[in-house]
Amino acid sequence: MKLNRITLLAATLLVLSPLTPAGAETSAPIPNPAPAHPELRPVLDEFGGHEGLKALMDDFMVILLDDPRMRPFFEQVDQQRVKDKLAEQFCVILGGDCSYTGMDMVEAHAGMEVRHADFNILVEDLQIAMDGRDIPTRAQNKLLAKLAPMHREVINR
Ligand code: HEM
């Protein structure tokens, strides 16, 4: 009788096992692409608020398209959409009264091969854009510190 029950349990587990693919329970959820940091609200002011971020993204996209290392990534995409979503994302991160309506960072960068070096180059170009708008280095670094951990979702090669 006891053996039968064990056999039944084993058979049930065998039948049910394909319903839970290996690793499904352990894979980490994709992090929030725009975690709000209300304490950074004063930093948002140094960027000129959401409007300042939109203007910064205009400059940033010009710099990216002018950079032969970055142009291949951005020349074919909807650049206005990317600028809009980035401005929203940065606004939320810096504690602004905005909403991020874009994709998560895994989805946004799927299908392109982003290396560690590409990530660093993009950050370099963002710094050039921020310098060009006289954003104080301390404010720049506050934003960059929140973007840095996203390399885990963005780099996929
Ligand atoms: C912390 C770093 C990064 C952040 C926060 C970021 C953020 C974003 C956001 C918000 C979007 C728009 C998502 C949407 O359309 O809903 C986007 C799209 C895109 N990103 Fe990034 N990104 C980062 C790094 C990179 C890097 C390193 C590359 C390549 C060198 C890259 C290339 C692109 C491209 C090409 C698109 C447009 C995709 C498409 O429309 O098909 N990004 N990114």
Image (tube, rainbow, N blue to C red):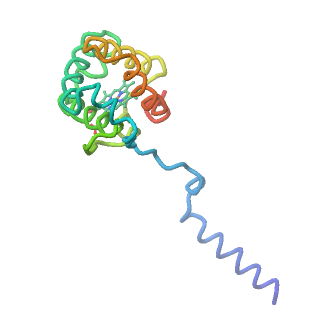
Q: Where residue 43 sits: x, y (%)? A: 34, 29
Residue ID at (82%, 86%): 2
Tell me: 148 left or right of 93: right
Residue farthest to the right, as pictured? 2
Q: Where residue 61 sits: x, y (%)? A: 24, 20
Residue ID at (24%, 28%): 53
Q: Looking at the picture, does residue 116 appear above or below residue 35?
A: above
Q: Where residue 57 sits: x, y (%)? A: 23, 24
Q: Looking at the picture, does residue 18 appear above or below residue 31?
A: below
Which residue is nearer to you in this view: 153 or 22? Answer: 153
Give the image quarter of residue 97. top left
Q: Quadrant of ligand 1?
A: top left
Which residue is nearer to you in this view: 155 or 123? Answer: 123
Q: How many marks?
A: 0
Q: Where residue 141 sits: x, y (%)? A: 42, 22
Residue farthest to the bottom, as pictured? 1
Which residue is nearer to you in this view: 152 or 46? Answer: 46
Q: Quadrant of the N terminus?
A: bottom right
Give the image quarter of residue 84. top left
Residue farthest to the front, as pictured? 42
Tell me: 145 left or right of 88: right
Tell me: 46 left or right of 15: left
Residue ID at (33%, 40%): 95
Residue ID at (37%, 21%): 140
